[in-house]
Amino acid sequence: TVEAPDGGILVLNNMYVPFWEARAGGRRLKIVPADASHMAVAVPPGTTAIEVRYRRPTVRGKIARLIDRAERP
């Protein structure tokens, strides 16, 4: 939960890896590296809650996407 009536930048004390996702009000927010090893997200004005999740793709998911692409004409 945040108070960001004018928006801002939220720096998270986690190591940046590309599998993190952030959302606010159902909208996806871009996470970027910050301070060489942490991550940050731009907080839109009026935001009160940000959800951050780690979603590392599974091998099964990668294989399914490759098969799906191969089956398209």
Image: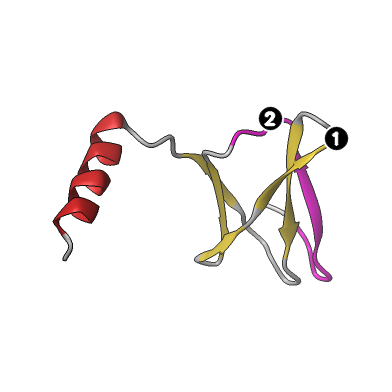
Q: Is residue 7 inside the magenta stretch?
A: yes
Image vertical order of residue 31 relative to residue 42, above or below: above
User: On the rendered structure, is 32 left or right of 34?
Assistant: left
Q: Earlier in the sequence, mark 2 or mark 1?
A: 2
Real-space Cα separation, disc 2 to disc 1, in angstroms: 11 Å
Q: Residue at x 71, y 47 (%)?
A: 32
Which amino acid does the dot numbered 2 rest on? Asn
Q: Position of residue 69 (x, y in %)?
A: 24, 54
Q: Position of residue 11 (x, y in %)?
A: 78, 43
Q: Residue at x 25, y 45 (%)?
A: 66
Looking at this view, is 3 or 73 the one in front?
A: 73
What's the mark number on residue 14? Answer: 2
Which quadrant of the view contains residue 12? top right
Q: Position of residue 47 (x, y in %)?
A: 69, 65
Which quadrant of the view contains residue 43? bottom right
Numbered disc 1: secondary structure: loop
User: On the rendered structure, is 72 left or right of 49?
Assistant: left
Q: Residue at x 67, y 62 (%)?
A: 48
Local packing at callout 1 (Cα closer than 10 Å; few below 14, some 14-19, many 20+) is few
Per the rendered image, the range of residues in magenta is 3-17
